[in-house]
Image (cartoon, rainbow, N blue to C red):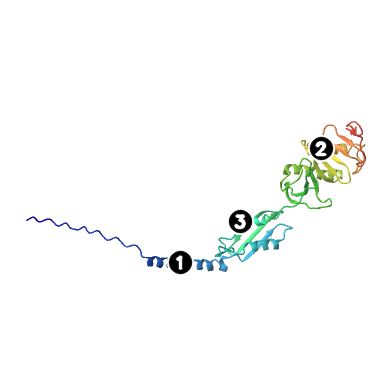
């Protein structure tokens, strides 16, 4: 009789059961509660007076209203991020947005926005000071105010009177905001203008850069000084000053002459006919002009 060996069944280990649907629900619910508590904590903590901007101090400038700047900054601080964190919260206040808003004022530059402690915001800025007016060739286009560095910062509007010297770029149709005249060039011309008034008693009302590379200094009351822009203006002034010491020309006053031409030293040409006198079409340097 043959007896067979009985084969044992291999018992496989039972697999760990996956989390049940109910367990998922519980965990999700607990997570929502935690997030809600965290949001509530952030909401109230970021609104505590000790951590929010309560005061704004504005300094700097001359003509720009500090109250207007303060109102703009206050407006920028209104509202919140994602309806949760107020824009007045000291760690997340909109520094860049405030700075960009300040730069929208044409006369304002170099704005500085800094925290003073946890509740005060200090806003300071510099202001462009008008030094002269710069215009292009096209009279229908606006002129711009420039500061002493030569930067064109704001449209001049319909300014009248002679308080500011008027510069004209004949080689440029119109002027736009930006650097227009180099500070060195403007400084040299400022010396020429100041020397003219102090030593000669003539007041310069306009400075024209011609397309030929010359500079025409227009004198209030009539007349002009012509110089070469490539030459030293201090030297050109001395040449003109020397001419006006000559007996024939020392009594010249604004309105008595059309121009003194110092573009071609050592020769200086003087046209001593009144500015409203028409010149012959064939006039030359040796015609009605006096040459020294």
Q: Nearer the viewer, residue 288 or 116?
A: 288
Left or right of residue 91, residue 273 in this image: right
Q: Earlier in the sequence, mark 3 or mark 2?
A: 3
Quadrant of the rendering where the N terminus is positioned: bottom left
| Residue 31 percent location from the top left of the image | 44, 65
**Structural distance between the alpha carbons of marks 3 and 2:** 47 Å
Q: Which residue is mark 2?
A: 227
Q: Nearer the viewer, residue 2 or 131?
A: 2
Q: Report helix, strand or loop for mark 3.
A: helix
N-term-proximal mark, 1 vs 3: 1
Residue beneath label 1, please?
A: 32
Quadrant in the rendering for residue 114: bottom right
Residue placed at 87% from the left, 36% from the top?
243
The quadrant in which the C terminus is found is: top right
Disc on the earlier residue, 1 or 2: 1
Provide residue 49's location: percent of width, then percent of height: 57, 68
**Residue denoted by label 3:** 96
């Amino acid at each position: 009789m043959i007896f067979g060996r009985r084969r044992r069944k291999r018992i496989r280990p039972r697999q760990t059961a996956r989390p049940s649907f109910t367990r998922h629900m519980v965990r999700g619910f607990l997570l929502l509660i935690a997030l809600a508590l965290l949001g509530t904590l952030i909401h109230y903590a970021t609104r505590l007076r000790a951590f929010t901007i309560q005061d704004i101090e504005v300094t700097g400038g001359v003509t720009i209203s500090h109250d207007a700047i303060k109102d703009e900054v206050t407006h920028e601080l209104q509202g919140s991020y994602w309806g949760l964190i107020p824009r007045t919260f000291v760690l997340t206040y909109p520094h860049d947005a405030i700075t960009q808003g300040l730069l929208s004022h044409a006369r304002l530059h170099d704005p500085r926005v800094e925290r003073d402690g946890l509740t005060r915001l200090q806003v300071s800025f510099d202001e462009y000071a008008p030094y002269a007016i710069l215009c292009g060739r096209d009279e229908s286009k606006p002129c711009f105010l420039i500061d002493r560095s030569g930067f064109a910062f704001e449209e001049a509007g319909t300014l009248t009177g002679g308080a500011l010297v008027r510069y004209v770029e004949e080689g440029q149709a119109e002027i736009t905001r930006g650097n227009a005249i180099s500070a060195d060039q403007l400084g040299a011309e400022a010396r020429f203008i100041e020397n003219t008034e102090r030593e000669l008693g003539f007041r310069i009302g306009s400075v024209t850069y011609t397309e030929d590379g010359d500079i025409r200094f227009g004198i209030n009351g009539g007349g002009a000084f012509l110089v070469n822009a490539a030459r030293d203006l201090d030297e050109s002034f001395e040449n003109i000053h020397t001419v006006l010491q000559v007996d024939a020309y020392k009594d010249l006053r604004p309105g008595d002459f059309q121009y003194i031409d110092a573009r071609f030293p050592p020769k200086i040409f003087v046209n001593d006919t009144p500015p409203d006198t028409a010149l012959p079409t064939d006039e030359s340097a040796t015609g009605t002009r006096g040459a020294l």
